[in-house]
């Protein structure tokens, strides 16, 4: 892990600016990064119509993990869409997208996927 020092000039800034800096500063916990990798593998390797559960005590990072997984999936889909002429036509892609949307609780009553 690489250590990152905060800017030295921050010490001369008003307390509101210092507080703002540290509120916006986040550090990825190594176990959270590992959990994200394992969750992404579980989602991508799951069978159609599968459920992927994440559970644990309050405050361990389940919601943070979900948000990170959503960001990765959304970014992957956006990159894939930009590489494809005329959008996606593949049934395999639609099935994969549906599996991921279901695993993230992003489906509508008619079974279609919400963006």
Image (cartoon, rainbow, N blue to C red):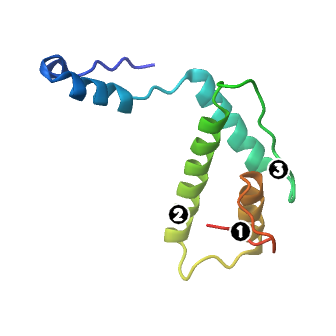
Q: Residue at x 72, y 56 (%)?
A: 100
What residue does disc 3 label?
A: 46
SS for tag 3?
loop
- Where residue 73 appears, x then y in whole percent? 61, 53
Name the residue located 66 percent from the left edge and 24 percent from the top edge.
60
Location of residue 23 (image quadrant): top left
| Farthest-out residue, front | 16
Mark 1 / mark 2, whichever is N-terminal: 2
Q: How many discs mark residues in the rendered view? A: 3
Q: Position of residue 75 (x, y in %)?
A: 53, 56
Residue on which disc 2 sits: 78
Q: Where's residue 42, x and y in %?
A: 77, 42
In whole angstroms, how far apart are the C-alphas of marks 1 and 2?
15 Å
- Label 1 belongs to which residue? 113
Give me the C-alpha separation between circle 3 and circle 2. 21 Å
Q: Does residue 62 sit above or below 104 in this rendering?
A: above
């Amino acid at each position: 892990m690489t250590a990152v020092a905060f800017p030295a000039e921050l010490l001369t800034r008003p307390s509101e600016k210092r507080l703002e800096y540290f509120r916006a500063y986040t550090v990825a916990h190594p176990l959270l990064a590992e959990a994200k990798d394992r969750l992404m593998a579980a989602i991508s390797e799951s069978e159609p119509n599968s459920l992927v559960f994440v559970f644990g005590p309050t405050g361990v990072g389940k919601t943070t993990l979900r948000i990170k997984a959503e960001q990765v999936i959304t970014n992957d889909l956006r990159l894939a869409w930009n590489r494809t002429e005329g959008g996606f036509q593949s049934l395999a892609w639609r099935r994969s997208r549906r599996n991921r949307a279901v695993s993230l609780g992003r489906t509508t009553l008619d079974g279609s996927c919400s963006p």
